[in-house]
Amino acid sequence: MSSRLSFAVGLACTAGLTGQLLAASPALAEEGRSGNAPEPPCTSSSGAYQWQLEKKLGLPQDGVQSTQDCIIIRRAQQRLGIKPADGKADLRTYRMLLVWEVRKNPNAQGKCPVRSYRVTCVDLNRQIMWVQTGKKVVFAPVPIRSGKNGYETRRGWHKIYLKRARHFSTIYNNAPMPHSQFFNGGQAFHGTKSDLFKSGSHGCVNMYAADAKRLFDLLKVGDRVYVWGTKPGTGKRNGTYSDDVLIAQGFGSFNIAEDPTADRPPTQEELQAAFDE
């Protein structure tokens, strides 16, 4: 049985149904968790990521929401902690399922350099990040939101050079940036209460507030960051610099991604330089 089908079967089983649910009729899918109580109605229509979720969950791939699809997607949402769990095949569910899939080995593609020291890995393609020391994952993958078109998060090697638990943007109308960790000019990891699955940032790596807090507690000034890939829908510049790049130049750190020391272990002085205002 494939891992995707196993996941879908597991969702069904934890809800009190057997793995045969996936091959059953919509009428059987309507049976309750205990086999007696009726399943709460699941009436969401087809979503933008219908086909993708059908494929990942081992469902019939027709791109059309069925009662069976709705129930299995809803149970996936419940397991992933998505609210509301309404069975809608939306981007949030698809992205969170991607995070779940890679949780044990996020670097299976080998895109993030393996070093003896701690490296924070930012995958713009999949919009996830994690932290690894050697091959050991020390901060499990979480969803992120990187820079939108024209404000892309800069790729390459970086260093954490400034940490502030309470920070407000001096560029974008005092926007709150809780648990900020700057790694390239004005670009930083920080928490947000806005929707991670819509649009993009002005170059920062946005995270759920709780994830940003945990990352803040883990990383130190001098820790290395590696960014690669392209956020879907970006990379379409017309050859001129964006405002964010010009701002970065003003910070005097536009070329930090080319810093020849960024691929070296942090010095003791760098590790001791972490602070929290």
Image (cartoon, helix red, strand yellow):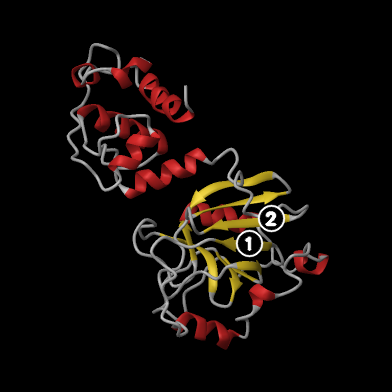
Q: Quadrant of residue 94?
A: top left
Q: Along the line of sight, which residue is nearer the eye, 80 or 235?
A: 235
Position of the C terminus by quadrant: bottom right
Q: Earlier in the sequence, mark 1 or mark 2?
A: 2
Quick one: which residue is furthest to the bottom in this view?
Answer: 250
Question: Could you say where residue 55 lies in the image, as x and y percent from the top left?
Answer: 36, 36
Q: Along the line of sight, which residue is nearer the eye, 22 or 141?
A: 22
Q: Secondary structure at mark 2?
A: loop
Which residue: 33% across, 30% down?
A: 75
How far apart in space, not on screen, are marks 1 and 2 (Cα)? 8 Å
Quick one: which residue is furthest to the top in this view?
Answer: 36
Inspect the image, locate mark 2, and give the three-letter code of the amino acid beneath it: Pro
Q: Which residue is mark 1?
A: 226
Q: Quadrant of residue 50?
A: top left
Is residue 69 in sight in this rendering? yes
Location of residue 108 with respect to 229 vertically, above or below: above
Question: Could you say where residue 86 lies in the image, as x and y percent from the top left?
Answer: 25, 38
Q: Which residue is mark 2?
A: 113
Q: Quadrant of residue 29?
A: top left
Which residue: 42% across, 26% down?
A: 5
Q: Callout 2 environment at 10 Å: few (<14), some (14 to 19), or many (20+)?
A: some
Question: Label for residue 164?
Answer: none
Q: Along the line of sight, which residue is nearer the eye, 94 or 61?
A: 61
Which residue: 67% across, 50% down?
A: 132
Question: Could you say where residue 207 lies in the image, as x and y percent from the top left?
Answer: 47, 57
Question: Could you say where residue 220 lies in the image, as x and y percent from the top left?
Answer: 69, 62
Inspect the image, locate mark 1, and give the three-letter code of the amino acid beneath it: Tyr
> Are discs 1 and 2 less than 8 Å apart at CB?
yes
Q: Secondary structure at mark 1?
A: strand
Is residue 170 in sight in this rendering? no
Q: How many marks?
A: 2
